[in-house]
């Protein structure tokens, strides 16, 4: 049979079309599923983004090794494309556009509220499913049916932590300090409401992001004579300086950080646990023996230690849930079908434990994964074991 | 009254840190006509050199600070001599080169040391307390170094042959060169002096605040603001503006709050530039 130029062109077009749907490796093995990772990979919050990236890469490697994602019976090759959002709305929007251009339909991340705000419209326009974080008050909602939260925001965990802190330290008044952008105000104000509901007088103080010396803010806080200070979502580097300067100014009360993990860096910058003195914080995942297995597995797969920040474990469980939903829906292109499958999945992870879908009361939609978490405590300058807390419910 | 004294002391501490930062920045502009966008990078590098000297070489902190200042001085000299000097009269090229150097430095530090702040504390941790005010001893050390730094730079620039030569080159390079002064030797030395100051400041201030690859960004912004306010190239202007900015920042943040305080500072700069575009002491930008 003579092969004409027309036959060659048709064959080429058919190959190109199949590559678009399944990715290049589809020619050799099964279809390729690209997970986009949008997170801050540089700057003061980079450890959060590195934890996210490491977690997505781990979940992808695990899925590939065990053939967890199968489409029409063929194991799907999961790969990760990570883009630095620089912790900005425009950075995250640009990253989402780039991923959309590459045909990526699933995004793990971003982390901060400004990023999520910038990313959501692009993701919605391109029917991308987002398993993100971001504690903004409008982070989720019925108008964003493909956007999910990897863990609860402060509306889920602030109340149980405050109850523990109140019992432990007998706090009656608190000043909350955070950066004066959405990443700060949306968390500090929700934390403040939770303090007030627990009978603790709360006032809010905001600072310009990029501030390096907090001595004036510390003086202002001292003038308010609070019994406790909560550093909310201040980045760990900022929080460490504030702790140190508060202690230099003579502040003796407990200091909280109801905004995320970062204890290690805060302690290093402040000058150690004796400077922290009495300190409490939200620990997204209680790292017990079962959770530690993820870290061991990571080392086996990648030959290095897992990223330091404990958000890593939360992102592992979130990414696993997305992959499970894709496998259940049996599609790597129909994100609405995957979202439907995700909503119907029980919140369960072999290492992190079992939980619930929450968010209906605060966001109007049950799109927040809620797993058991922990409360970190330093008392009298000594690090205490993490206090386990059941998965938040009802919000 | 106690509150005013306490806030004033914070303003002086902030001003001392800012003055040390701004001196090198304004020196480079005043003599070479180069806006050094790598200034924040030399500050961070100074911090990491001191941290490495203490942590990995086991040097005492004081020696580590000297090593950091010498290290950044050497790098500044080499950069000016072998890179910047070739395009010294092309303002866009120097801007791009210094910006590029800063990006290389911060990315390099990120790759080597990672994004997180290491444990790097100032060796003196005490606090002097009075009635209604307090002063951390580390801030007093920075203030003392700042005063010595300012006086040394003044003495060097106004009372030595080296300083006279630099001022002559800044005033009219062709005439100064015709008189036998050698820009190829003096410019790298002046640049090195300024980068050494930035490194010294980094080594002193990062253990008081925090050390991370990105902490040079706000340093550059603050130095720029102070130097513009004081008058580009003016050592006296930069010093006065640094303490003015420190005071405004302290009082506005304490009495108006963090957000309004930052706004107040920029409103002050805006008014100053409208009323006196050349800055507080900027009679003219530079002659050469």
Image (spheres, coloured by chain):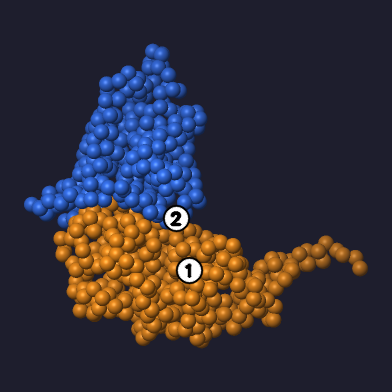
Disc 1 target residue: A312
Q: Residue at x 21, y 73 (%)?
A: A171
Please name whichever residue, A148 or B127, is drawn nearer the observer in this view of the structure. B127
Is B249 rendered above or below residue A330?
Answer: above
Crowding at dot 1, Cα within 10 Å, few <14 / some 14-19 / many 20+, comes out as many
Examine the rendered structure and indicate whether residue A224 appears above or below residue B24: below
Q: In the visual, does B83 lie left or right of A14?
A: left
Residue A235's spot in the image, x, y percent? 36, 61
Chain painted in orange in the figure: A
Residue bearing mark 2: B115
Q: Residue B287, relative to residue A176: is it above or below?
A: above
What chain is tagged by disc 2? B
Q: Residues within 10 Å of mark 2 (few under 14, many from 20)?
A: many
Horizontal arrangement in the rendering, residue A182 relative to residue B116 (left or right): left
The image quadrant that residue B64 belongs to is top left
The x and y percentages for residue A255 are 27, 66
Q: Which mark is residue B75?
A: none
Q: Nearer the viewer, residue A73 or A320?
A: A320
Which color was chain B given?
blue
- The residue at 25%/56% (across/down) is A245
Q: Position of residue A354 (x, y in %)?
A: 47, 84
Q: Circle 2 — which element?
A: loop
- Chain ID of residue with mark 1: A
Residue B43 in view, yes or no: no
Percent across and percent down for residue A86 are 45, 58
């Amino acid at each position: 049979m003579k092969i004409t130029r027309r036959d060659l062109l048709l064959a080429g077009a058919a190959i190109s079309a199949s590559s678009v749907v399944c990715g290049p490796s589809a020619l050799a093995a099964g279809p390729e599923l690209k997970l986009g990772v949008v997170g801050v990979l540089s700057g003061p919050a980079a450890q959060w983004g590195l934890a996210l990236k490491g977690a997505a890469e781990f979940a992808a490697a695990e899925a590939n090794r065990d053939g967890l994602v199968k489409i029409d019976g063929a194991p799907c090759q999961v790969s990760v494309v990570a883009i630095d959002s620089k912790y900005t709305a425009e950075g995250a929007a640009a990253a989402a556009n780039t991923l959309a251009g590459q045909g990526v339909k699933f995004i793990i991340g971003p982390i901060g509220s400004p990023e999520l705000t910038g990313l959501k419209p692009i993701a919605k326009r391109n029917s991308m499913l987002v398993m993100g974080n971001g504690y903004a008050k409008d982070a989720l909602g019925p108008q964003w049916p493909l956007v999910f939260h990897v863990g609860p925001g402060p509306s889920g965990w602030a109340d149980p932590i405050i109850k523990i802190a109140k019992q432990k330290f007998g706090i009656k008044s608190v000043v909350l300090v955070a950066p004066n952008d959405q990443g700060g105000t949306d968390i500090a104000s929700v934390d403040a409401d939770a303090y007030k509901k627990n009978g603790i007088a709360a006032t809010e103080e905001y600072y310009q992001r990029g501030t390096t010396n907090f001595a004036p803010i510390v003086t202002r806080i001292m003038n308010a004579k609070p019994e406790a200070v909560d550093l909310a979502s201040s980045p760990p580097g900022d929080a460490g300086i504030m702790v140190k300067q508060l202690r230099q100014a003579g502040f003796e009360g407990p200091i909280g950080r109801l905004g995320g993990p970062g204890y290690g860096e805060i302690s290093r910058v402040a000058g150690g646990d004796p400077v922290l003195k009495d300190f409490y914080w939200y620990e997204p995942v209680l790292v017990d023996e079962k959770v530690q297995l993820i870290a061991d597995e990571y080392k086996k797969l990648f030959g290095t230690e897992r990223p330091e920040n404990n958000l890593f474990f939360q992102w592992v469980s979130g990414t696993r849930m997305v992959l499970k939903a894709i496998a259940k829906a049996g599609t790597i292109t129909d994100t609405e079908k995957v979202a439907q499958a995700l909503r119907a999945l029980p919140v369960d992870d072999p290492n992190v434990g079992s939980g619930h879908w929450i968010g209906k009361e605060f966001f109007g939609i049950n799109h927040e994964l809620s797993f058991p978490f922990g409360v970190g405590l330093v008392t009298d300058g000594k690090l205490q074991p993490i206090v386990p807390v059941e998965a938040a419910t009802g919000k | 009254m106690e509150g005013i004294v306490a806030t004033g002391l914070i303003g002086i501490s902030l001003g001392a840190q800012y003055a040390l930062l701004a001196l090198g920045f304004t020196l480079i502009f005043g003599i070479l006509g180069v806006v050094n966008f790598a200034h924040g990078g030399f500050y961070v590098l100074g911090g990491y050199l001191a941290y490495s000297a203490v942590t990995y070489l086991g040097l005492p902190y004081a020696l580590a600070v000297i090593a950091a200042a010498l290290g950044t001085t050497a790098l500044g000299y080499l950069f000016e001599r072998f890179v910047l000097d070739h395009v010294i009269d092309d303002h866009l090229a120097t801007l791009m080169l210094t910006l590029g150097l800063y990006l290389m430095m911060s990315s390099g530090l990120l790759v080597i040391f990672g994004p997180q702040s290491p444990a790097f504390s100032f060796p003196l941790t005490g606090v002097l307390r009075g009635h209604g005010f307090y002063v951390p001893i580390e801030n007093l050390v920075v203030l003392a170094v700042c005063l010595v730094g300012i006086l040394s730079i003044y003495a060097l620039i106004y009372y030595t042959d080296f300083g006279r030569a630099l001022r002559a080159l800044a005033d009219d390079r062709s005439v100064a060169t015709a008189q036998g002064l050698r820009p190829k030797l003096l410019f790298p030395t002046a640049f090195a002096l300024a980068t050494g100051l930035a490194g010294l400041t980094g080594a002193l201030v990062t253990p008081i605040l925090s050390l991370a690859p990105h902490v040079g960004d706000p340093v550059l912004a603050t130095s720029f603001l102070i130097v513009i306010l004081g008058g580009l190239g003016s050592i006296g202007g930069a010093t006065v503006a640094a303490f003015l900015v420190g005071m405004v920042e302290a009082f506005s943040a304490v009495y108006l709050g963090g957000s309004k305080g930052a706004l107040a500072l920029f409103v002050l700069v805006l008014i100053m530039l409208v009323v006196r575009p050349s800055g507080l002491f900027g009679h003219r930008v530079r002659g050469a």
